[in-house]
Image: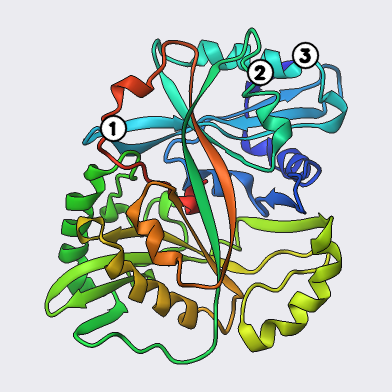
Amino acid sequence: MRIRRATSQDNPAILALLENTPQPGAMSLTFERRPDYFRGAAITCEEPEVWVAETDGPSPELGAVYNVGRRRVWVNGDCVPIRYAHDLRIAPRHQGSRLLFRLFRTLKTTLHEAEWMQTVILRDNGVSRNTVASGRAGLPVYYPFGTIETSVIHTRPGRFRAPAGLTVRAMTGADRGALLALLEREGPRKQFFPRLDLSELYSSPYFHGLSLGDWVGVWQGTTLKGVLGSWNQSDIKQTRVNGYRGALEWLRPLLNATRPLHGGLRLPAPGECLSFVTLHTLVTENNDPQWLVPLLEHAVHAHHRDHGAVVCGFFTQDPLRDAVRGFRRRTLFSDHYLVSYGEDPRPRLQPDRIPYVEVARL
């Protein structure tokens, strides 16, 4: 088995591997990247670093893939490039072999001394927690650093009306300065908030498909109090249902039948994709959830015609999480880790800074 950096020629094999390694749970899902894995990788990390393992011989087959690219985030108030370890997939025929340990040995040689990474594991994915996060000899240490609650918020029909005294509208070119000021003021206060260079909005693959009008702001008079963005990534990232189990399997027809009355996400047949929009850059003045509520209300109405849900996520200690409590939603939980071959990086992180997760870039 040979482990090497991936190239664009590996795209078909990587896509096939992603589609053949579903994530377990009551709703088994495959996270796909058609038509181009590398285009999807470029919105997750500003500097993707994709590795593959392939069998030896004249007709090599792909046995594994993983990505440990970097993106700029705020850490302790400083802008730092941090690796995000994700998209680890091992072909079924190689699961349980020594390949996982070989992958991590290669990874160790690519990391700088004392370098650490972020990673996220779905709570339902016990297989990953019992393998990569098991602490076995030869593997890096996965240091727990928070729980992420992802909310799948049901969209609903009707017309949005802003609360008295507030204006909720899409951003325009004239609002660019106010948006930048809010991001530069509030972003560094959190751990891992992405450093966004909006001068690259229309040129960098990191912002694929986005425009300034995809951000919506809430204004009190002439003051921007909060913002969120909407991102339809279905042209480069798909979440396909592989199957259902347990109560969800027989409840699915009933839930779909009541959707026209109550709104919400249609649960597609196995083999079909979920239809949702991902929310990103959820920022408010002083991290106050009161400014986020009207933005979420606007989103659930604005996207109802074409999508059954909008998706966002917060660390469980983030006060902004309170803003989603009044909405009809489904939740799923993930464990966030800092991964290191060296010392525990957690004591170096200032504890008064709330961590931030950008689910659109997971």
**Are the residues tagged 2 and 3 within 8 Å (C-beta)?**
no
For numbered disc 3, what is the local secondary structure?
loop
- Tell me which amino acid carries mark 1: Pro
Q: Say which element carries label 2.
A: helix
Query: Which residue occupies the extreme left position in the image?
Result: 222
Q: Position of residue 198 (x, y in %)?
A: 28, 55
The CA span between labels 1 and 2 is 32 Å
The percent position of residue 74, horizontal first and vertical second, equals 28, 38
Query: In front: mark 1 or mark 2?
Result: 1
- Kindly identify the residue that appears in the image at 31 percent across and 42 percent down: 354
Residue at mark 2 to residue at mark 3: CA–CA distance:
9 Å
Query: Quick check: 197 above or below 61?
Result: below
Q: Quadrant of residue 27?
A: bottom right
The answer to whether 109 appears left or right of 250 in the picture is: left
Q: Quadrant of the N terminus?
A: top right
Q: Which residue is mark 2?
A: 103
Q: Looking at the rendered structure, which numbered label has been put on residue 351?
A: 1
Disc number lying in front (3 or 1): 1
Residue 174 is situated, as x and y percent measured from the top left of the image, at 18, 73
Give the SS element for disc 1: loop
What residue is disc 3 on? 98
Nearer the N terminus, badge 1 or badge 2?
Answer: 2
Q: Earlier in the sequence, mark 3 or mark 1?
A: 3
Residue 148 visible in this rendered orientation of the protein: yes
